[in-house]
Image (cartoon, rainbow, N blue to C red):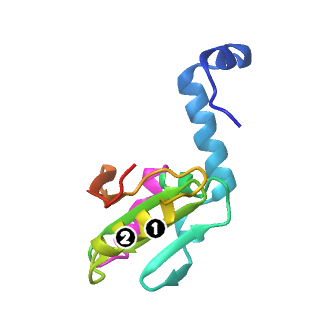
Amino acid sequence: MRFVNTEDLAAMGLSEDEAFARGAKNTAAELGPPEGRLAREQDGFQVYTGHAYASSLLLPASAWAKVAGRTKGGLLMIAPKPDLLFVMDAATPDAEGMMARVAAVAAADAPGRMSTLVYRWSSGGWQPFLRGPQSL
């Protein structure tokens, strides 16, 4: 697997915007809406894993408004690896600390590790909120 470059786009006859739109459509078709995937709750976390692109579930920002509306304190999210996404109600006691710690542990020495940043949902989408102890 590799990133698409400008030569690839030219060969496919796609502009950058068209490629992003196609990627978003394919991701949505493959992963479905977040509320349908974030069903397993454990210790306050809703977890999505089991798919190589699980972290891409955070991208359709409009789909998260419904999930955020069911929380008491808003949403926090971490995507420490491409195949792992955690979401938690920010009203959960020590939610920020738990998310930062879990992100650091999940990303440590993981193949394809991404980030230990904790994101907070806002009406404008996911915003970087808290840097974990070992941000990448």
Looking at the rendering, which quadrant does residue 104 occupy?
A: bottom left
**Residue 73 versus residue 62: which sits nearer the camera?**
73
Q: Residue at horizontal 61%, vertical 51%? A: 28
State the image coordinates of residue 97 (x, y, percent, origin top left). Answer: 29, 73
Q: Residue at horizontal 67%, vertical 66%? A: 50
Asked whether residue 73 appears in the rendered view, the answer is yes
**Residues rendered magenta in the picture:** 59-72
Tag 2 residue: 101
- Indicate whether 37 appears above or below 28: below
Looking at the rendering, which quadrant does residue 9 occupy?
A: top right
State the image coordinates of residue 14 (x, y, percent, origin top left). Answer: 64, 20
Give neighbour class at mark 2: few <14, some 14-19, many 20+ (Cα, 10 Å). some
Tag 1 residue: 105
Instruction: State left or right for residue 14 relative to residue 80.
Output: right
Asked whether residue 33 appears in the rendered view, the answer is no
State the image coordinates of residue 135 (x, y, percent, origin top left). Answer: 36, 53
Q: Residue at horizontal 34%, vertical 58%? A: 119
Say if the magenta span includes residue 127: no
Determine whether label 1 and label 2 are within 8 Å by CB. yes
Q: Amino acid at mark 1?
A: Val
- Indicate whether 62 appears above or below 44: above
Looking at the rendering, which quadrant does residue 54 occupy?
A: bottom right
Say if the magenta span includes residue 64: yes
* Main secondary structure of the magenta stretch: helix
Query: What numbered label is drawn on residue 10?
Result: none
Q: Residue at horizontal 60%, vertical 16%? A: 6
Q: Amino acid at mark 2?
A: Arg
Instruction: State left or right for residue 42 relative to residue 4.
Output: left
Give neighbour class at mark 1: few <14, some 14-19, many 20+ (Cα, 10 Å). some
